[in-house]
Image (cartoon, rainbow, N blue to C red):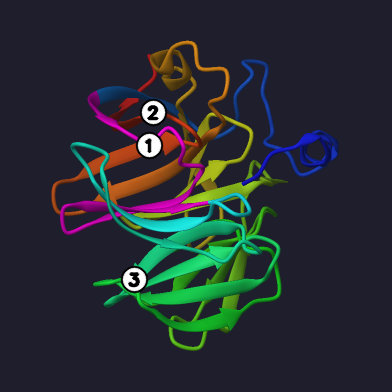
Amino acid sequence: MKKGPLLLIAVLLSTCLVPETASGMTGAPVYGYKVVSVYPHDRDAFTQGLFFEDGFLYEGTGLYGRSELRKVELKTGKVLRSYRLPDRFFGEGITQWEDKIIQLSWREKEGFVYEKEDFGLVRKFSYETEGWGLTRDDKRLIMSDGSPYLHFLDPQTFKETGRIEVTDKGVPVANLNELEYVKGRIYANVWQTSRIAIISPETGLVEAWLDLSGLVHELGALPDADVLNGIAYDNEHDRLFVTGKFWPKLFEIRIVPVR
């Protein structure tokens, strides 16, 4: 999400934080990364949702008056198609279900269903919590709301069918944001950090952490760049992509052990 002094204060005061050890990291194993390729990314995109399908990136952006759904060419970063949300909506996570794209809004508690082919708006739906991140497995949608909980939704009715609490060594992990389903695990950006939690969808346990703090240095001196946010997985070619809000680059990375 989101930025601003009140939200940041809320994060700092939260009791549901990532547990830390003497090393400054968490109880679950921590992995690093290797940059495989770097692609251009729109510097004006406040990235809220991301997925990869059929050779293209699909991106949801946020901020009131600037929120969009986009189809993006990977190699050039060129926006090939876009849909602008009404100004009263703050766009959030996106995912695909069959031939549709689903997009959340933040505090408006309203979601949108589009035709994937032309971004034609098909229907709207509502939910009870805030909307942050969105992904899917083969049977259901998976939504985050900024809390330690992930909500499972029926992809036809959008009714909640279950939920799990995400924990690391028994401590709830709050501020779960953008989501991606990768090889049977849920990858979740943790807002205001440079880490991705790798989560078991059955138990909610954080099985590992991916530390991407070094990517900030890859960006260079960019004072307006915001936090890491945006995970996309190319299932066909086993490629993992990450970016951030107002980042001019999108990185293809490979996960590696930390020595």
Where is residue 11? Give x, y as percent. Answer: 77, 39
Q: Which residue is mark 1?
A: 42
Between marks 2 and 1, how big is the CA–CA gap? Answer: 6 Å
Q: Quick check: 79 left or right of 258? A: left
Q: Which label number is shown at residue 248? A: 2
Which quadrant of the structure image shows residue 115? bottom left
Q: Which residues are magenta?
A: 36-61
Q: Check disc 3 and report the residue beneath it.
A: 119
Q: Are marks 2 and 1 in contact (CB under 8 Å)?
A: yes
Kind of residue at badge 3: Phe
Mark 1 or mark 2, which is nearer the start of the sequence?
Answer: 1
The foreground one among 66 and 222 is 66
In this image, 133 relative to 52: left or right? right
Mark 2 vs mark 3, CA separation in Å = 25 Å
Q: Is residue 186 visible?
A: no
Residue 60 spot, x, y in % from top left: 44, 55
3 or 1: tag closer to the N-terminus: 1
Q: For mark 2, give the secondary structure.
A: loop
Residue at (39, 28) in percent of width and height: 248
**Which sits earlier in the primary sequence, circle 2 or circle 3?**
3
Tag 2: residue type? Pro
Alpha carbons under labels 3 and 1: distance apart: 20 Å
